Image (cartoon, rainbow, N blue to C red):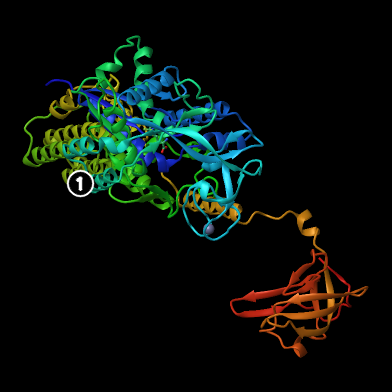
Amino acid sequence: MKRKKILITSALPYANGPLHFGHIAGAYLPGDCYARYERLKENEVLYVCGSDEYGIAITLSAEMAGRTPQQHVDLFHKMNKDFFDHLNFSFDHYSRTTCKGHKELVQQFFNDLLQNGYIEEKITDQLYSPKDDKFLADRYVTGTCPQCSYDKARGDECQNCGASYEATDLKNPRSKITGAPLILKPTKHWFLLLEKFREKLLEWLDSKDWKPNVVKFVKNYIEELKPRCITRDSYWGVPLPLPGTEGKVFYVWFDAPIGYLSATKEWAEKIGEPERWKDYWCDPDTKLVEFVGKDNVPFHAVFFPAMIMGQKQFYKLVDELPANEFYNLEGRQFSKSDGWYIDLEDFFKKYTSDQIRYAIAANAPETSDSEFSWKDFQNRCNSDLLGKYGNLVNRTLIFAAKHCDGKIPEMKDLEEVDRTFLNEIRGLIGQASKCYEEFKIRRASQIVMEIAQKGNVYFDAKKPWVSAKDPSLHRSMANTIACCLECLKALALVSFPIIPGTAEKVWHMIGQKKPFSQNRWNDLEEKNLLPGTQLPTPEVLFRKVEDEEIVLESQKLRSLSQNKQDPLATIQEFQKLDFRVGKVLSAEPVPKSDNLFKLSIDLGSEKRTIVSGIRRHYSAEQIIGKNVIVIANLAPAKIMGVESQGMLLAGKNGDTLEVLSVDTLPPGSKVS
Ligand code: MF3
Ligand code: ZN
């Protein structure tokens, strides 16, 4: 069999904040499982990824955090990398778009497109800050919504009415950072003439057998192609390679996908064969598989392919584009800023990377959105990993240590039930193989557990503990354990792409010496274990996740987000308020309002006018004479034309309202 060259990429994550399990489920874990599988199948796999480090979002966050963009991406690039290491990712190279060589490659892409007639320059009016002497990108702009007049609308859409527009449509545009007013000023930008690729793209797409919904979406997208601006006014990004263009850089989605090539080049240099990247990118026989989240599909199926089609030299176009849906956290999107997230440092102190890899794989968002929940995580860990997988490994090895001299027994004179069992396991290995080839890690994870369950059922049915007591049945007992050990081998094999750490342990626990990754899938599928091999003392694979832990984790999740929504008040903040007892002297309805009273209140040393919304609940007679509780030091406010000099306290529940009062304390008494 000829080894196939397979180049695998996962979308380059931004170096702009910590990654979370939502990202992992989309473009990363499926890519890693696939890479691990194809390596076992003896293909020539190269798996590259890296941090996406340019773009306006990054300059904005960096400035807000008081860092330079370089400091900012250095920080998060390292965090990204550590996160992937923690999760046992098997990238052959993890690069970054600020790496050496990326800039030149991006500029070369641009020059080719320009010379081939796919780029046009245009002068348009853009928002400019005379005070800061610069053009501001959408994200830096705020102003009044052209639709609803909300005065803090964002540069691209209004968070009040939902309208979307160009930043230049905003009324009274200002800089989000300095508040400086902005004016329209003409500036030159470069546009990629995407519509020129329409026919070529459609024809190319016809040769793909991608998921129908992806193809349909992409076709519609191609129909509507228009020239797209690929430059920005910014100091952070790959500069244009043209004279007189200071302050212009490429749009991040123009440079980022070229990052796949620069990462491959950097890898080639790292291994001391600088030309090796061409083996992958410039050879039509390479299979290129790009793992992405669904929001990245247009860039990978249209924008980047068009950029490649417009080059003077041949580069690979994507062959497979596995695109996953979204992975949420207990019903909502993961969001650090809303406090809806999992503290990863804490997580990895308590749980292993295989537990989370398995939980994500078992619930991978392949056909629809899915989510992480603590309850599901506990279930996957306890009933699957511990109850099925761990259980079979444990009982088989303990039994072998006790009754088979701690060695792999020989298989001889197998019974029908043994042969059926081995055949079924083999069938499941074949099914798993197909799943990995088709990027279906959810189904693959189910097959892992089906294999474990088959093993457990077989063990129970054959009752080796009974045959152990009767010397005439020792042959059958030995066969049972030999078959179970074959099942453990199958488990290690089929689970390796998803839970590599565990598979490696099982592999050593069945007496094998070389690292698991040096195996070949087909060998393990075909050849039996060597009888007589010494088995080391088994170790425990998984720890039980207790109910109490899960209750605590769920509480922690909810309190983190609660704190964000209702920050705690300090005692000092509370003490700032001056609560007093006040006697209601009079109550007049406020004209044109059906719920307001203008109250006159005696606070002991002075009289106050307070406007209060209690008229639907109290008549004038009911409220006059009451000793109510008033906030005496509230800043005065005009309500329906009347100045209110305080506020009185009332409890409310649905439609019921009750004013707080005390019976015997005189007006002016302090309340605290
Ligand atoms: N950084 C982008 C995201 O996280 C993905 C970039 S993919 C690449 O959505 F192809 F542009 F690199
Ligand atoms: Zn609006």
Percent of width and height locating residue 188: 48, 32
Name the foreground residue: 311 vs 619.
Answer: 311
Name the foreground residue: 614 vs 502.
Answer: 614
Residue with the mark numbered 1? 457
Type of the residue with mark 1: Val
Quarter of the image containing the N terminus? top left
Q: Residue pushed farthest right?
A: 605
Q: Is residue 646 visible?
A: yes
Vertical placement of residue 398 versus 626, above or below: above
Vertical placement of residue 367 versus 239, above or below: below
Percent of width and height locating residue 213: 24, 49
Corner quadrant of residue 12: top left
Element carrying mark 1: helix
Percent of width and height locating residue 148: 54, 61
The structure residue drawn at horizontal position 57% and vertical position 59%, both measured from the top left corner, is 149
Name the foreground residue: 506 vs 630.
Answer: 630
The structure residue drawn at horizontal position 32% and vertical position 10%, both measured from the top left corner, is 273
Q: Is residue 407 visible?
A: no
Cβ of disc 1 within 8 Å of ligand 1? no
Quarter of the image containing the C terminus? bottom right
Vertical placement of residue 334 versus 571, above or below: above
